[in-house]
Amino acid sequence: MSMATDTGTKQEVQIIGLVSFAHLLSHLYMLALPPMFPQLRTDFNVGYVELGLSITAYAVTTGLLQTPVGFLVNRIGGQRVLAAGLFLNALAIALTGLATDYWQIVCLMLLAGAGSSVFHPADYSILNARISTGRLGRALSSHSLAGNLGFLAAPPIMVALAAATNWRVATMSIGLVGMGLGVALFFLTTLLSGIGKAKAKQKDSWGQLLGSPKILMLFAFYVLSSAANSGMVHFSVVAFKDIYGLPVTVTAVALTAYQGLQMAAVLPGGWLADKIENHELILALCFALSGVCVLVAGAGGLPFWIVVVMLGMAGAMRGLVNASRDVSVRHAATDGVSVGTLFGFVTTGYSGGQIIGPAIYGWLMDFGHPELVFWASASFSTLAITTMLVNRATPRG
């Protein structure tokens, strides 16, 4: 291997590490306050509904601003946008430790959500621009895994910091970490400057996004896959309790298997994405297998250890295709829309799935048919498969 190749590989590793750590922090910040809710409830004399609305405020600004931020990345590049967004996100979280009233928490969550909106457009733009095609799948899978680790790390980190000090010091401490990285990213011009900036003639627009059948199919895929996943994450534990008559302490094991194997399969999925060409077909196959496993798990009448295995396999199939999904989105950028804008737009579909899914699953549970939770999840997966196959058959614009 030549020295030039060694240097290029080292730079790619540095870029992946920096961007992935920023992504980890963004996910950690999403869950920074919920572990502190009992203390916040006492300090601000509010209920859990009000505290839940503060998290909704975070999600709303994140979702609404992702596509406009993609337009900004298209114009000025990913480095400054990522640095500013991370700093804003972290600053808002740190300032919650100084809040004296509930309305201040809501305002800061709106601000934190605005900062959080930069990560998908800027991160994917940077990785696409600076990581070689042969390693892009593994880069995307590392990025995805880092986000999952942020979710996983948030509760124990926040609880431990709050136990050692208090919730205010905990949020300020974790916020300072992101602020420091944001400043560092701003000055890493040699490594990151200009990354993700579109060519002078390329101007993204809403018309390009909404007028492309392939892009709309990808958006629909994110909505449907998110809705399918929300059924398992939010309702599988209580549904299994009703179906199998077991305590939630037992049925929660199945959800742990689902999420744990989903995370474990992400990095192997990056290697797979680098080795295959037909990403849409592998997505369809894995989602089909995941849906079948979900149906078997929710059928009832099985030893519960088989249910745990089936749900674990369902999660593994979903994690295995995370990178293939992202590579498919990257390919759609050839329709004339920059990578950052495209990812900002289609990943907004996550929020759509999180909105429609829980309401449907909750209605099915109230209706007295917990087994239909699994049928609904598998149905959403089937519809997601359809969007990918239609996307593959649709000519590029």
Image (cartoon, rainbow, N blue to C red):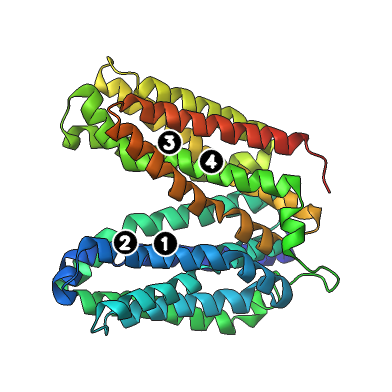
Per the rendering, the mark at residue 224 is 4
x and y percent of residue 218 in the render?
Answer: 65, 46
Camera-nearest residue between 22 and 371: 371
Q: Considering the numbered disc 2 on the image, is that residue within a helix, a strand or a loop?
A: helix
Which x, y percent locates residue 205?
75, 65
Q: What label does residue 27 carry, if any?
A: 1
Please tell me the numbered disc located at residue 394.
none
User: Marks 4 and 2: CB-CB under 8 Å?
Assistant: no
Instruction: Characterize the local packing of mark 3: few (<14), some (14-19) or many (20 or more) Cα atoms within 10 angstroms.
Output: many
**Residue at (39% x, 55% y) in the render:** 149
Please give the residue where the numbered disc 3 appears in the rendered image.
315
Q: Which amino acid does label 2 sit on?
A: Ala
Q: In which quarter of the image is residue 343?
A: bottom right
Q: Which residue is drawn at 54% across and 65% down?
A: 64
Q: Earlier in the sequence, mark 4 or mark 2?
A: 2
Which mark sits nearer the N-terminus, 3 or 4? 4
Name the mark on residue 154.
2
Q: Which residue is drawn at 30% across and 61% down?
A: 52
- Residue 148 vs residue 346: left or right? left
Looking at the image, tell me whether mark 2 or mark 3 is earlier in sequence order. 2
Dot 4: within a 10 Å radius of its alpha carbon, few (fewer than 14), some, or many (20 or more) residues?
A: many
If the image is split into quadrants, where does the N terminus sit?
bottom right
Residue 372: give x, y in percent of width and height.
37, 26
Q: Does 162 appear above or below 235?
A: below
The CA distance from mark 4 to mark 2 is: 27 Å
Mark 1 touches mark 3? (CB < 8 Å): no
Amino acid of disc 4: Leu
CA separation in Å, label 3 and label 4: 16 Å
Tell me, yes or no, if residue 370 can be seen here. yes
Label 1 and label 2: CA atoms lie apart by: 8 Å
Answer with mark 1 or mark 4, whichever residue precedes in sequence. 1
> Which secondary structure lies at badge 4?
helix
